[in-house]
Amino acid sequence: MEEINEVKTDENDLSGQMLQVIEPEPKPKLISLYKDVKGKKVKISQLVPFDKHPFNVPSKTDPDMQKLIKSIEKEGLLDLPIVRKIGNETEEDTYQIISGHRRIEAYKILGFEEISVRIIDCPDDDVATIIMISSNVQRETINFTERVKACALMYETKKHQGKSTGKEEEKSTREYVGKIWNFSANKVQRYVELSKLSDTFFDLIEDKKLSSAAATEISSMSKSMQDLMEEIISENEGLRITKKQAHEIRKQKELTTKDKILEFLQNNNEDTQVEETTQSENTGLNIS
């Protein structure tokens, strides 16, 4: 294999560059820092996914993957994946995918054994995480679950970079992340809380069986109450819990058992059609 062409980056300088690149004015426009890095072919078997990657990689039969495959067959790979070298020196180098999980999966499906990538020297995990999330923000559609988990991950990463837990620093971090996603700081905080819910709740939201508003109320409950609510919903197919009901369950301290909660829901049987989640919540973020 030909010699790998890597680009060296100082992690402190890179953090500053990222701030300049992704600071929205007034909407985020992300410009790759690595367009000048020449692509090099590596074996797909040498590539491993990013550990904290919160975005879904669709299956072969998924319409989005089929669309990507057809695009690659027709036009080739228009934007090379970004990877970084990881691990110790071995007989065969291993690279972690920072950006391009879907494109690489499409290449696998098409039967390719090699793919051209941009290899960067980025040892700082926080910086790599920010690049990974920022590159995915540019996608046409991001579902609600992906957006919540990615937004929360970006918040935790930026907070870790600051090495501070002070209220002012946390507020500044929420505002920074909010600008990236075109959110308010309060919405970022709400997403951070939502991200702690189990995948069961996110499945319910994606299937439109639970509104994000009701899920937000549940995310404010204790972990034991969240587990109880998950059990109740799972055992009662067709049960719909509204924001108002979830709010009352959270506030009324005596509602701590399955029987009491089910009785409360029966006695407060309002229109349980799931509140319509706003289009911006369910259809994905659209960033130009």
Image: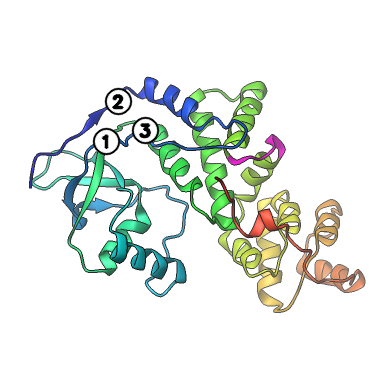
Q: What residue type is labelled 1?
A: Ile
Labels 1 and 2 touching (C-beta < 8 A)? yes
Residue 129 shown left or right of residue 108 in the figure: right
Residue farthest to the right, as pictured? 267
Q: Alpha-carbon distance for marks 3 and 1? A: 10 Å
Judged from the image, the secondary structure of the residue bearing numbered disc 1 is: strand
Judged from the image, the secondary structure of the residue bearing numbered disc 3 is: loop
Occupied quadrant, residue 65: bottom left
Measuring from the top left, give residue 271's x and y in whole percent: 87, 71
Let me know if residue 283 appears in the view: yes
Give the image's coloring scheme: rainbow
Q: Alpha-carbon distance for marks 2 and 3? A: 10 Å
Measuring from the top left, give residue 107's x and y in whole percent: 27, 62
Disc number lying in front (3 or 1): 3
Q: What residue type is labelled 2?
A: Thr
Q: Between disc 2 and disc 3, whose residue precedes?
A: 2
Q: Which mark is residue 33?
A: 3
Occupied quadrant, residue 113: bottom left
> Crowding near pointer 1: few (<14 within 10 Å), some, many (20+)?
many
Q: Which of 203 and 257 is in front in this view?
A: 203
Measuring from the top left, give residue 86's x and y in whole percent: 24, 40
Residue 177 shown left or right of residue 61 in the figure: right
Let me know if residue 254 appears in the view: no
- Residue range of the region highlighted in magenta in the rendering: 181-186
Labels 3 and 1 touching (C-beta < 8 A)? no
Q: Which amino acid does label 3 sit on?
A: Leu
Q: Alpha-carbon distance for marks 1 and 2? A: 8 Å
Q: Mark 1 points at which residue?
A: 120
Residue farthest to the front, as pictured? 75
Q: Name the residue under label 2.
A: 9
Labels 2 and 3 touching (C-beta < 8 A)? yes
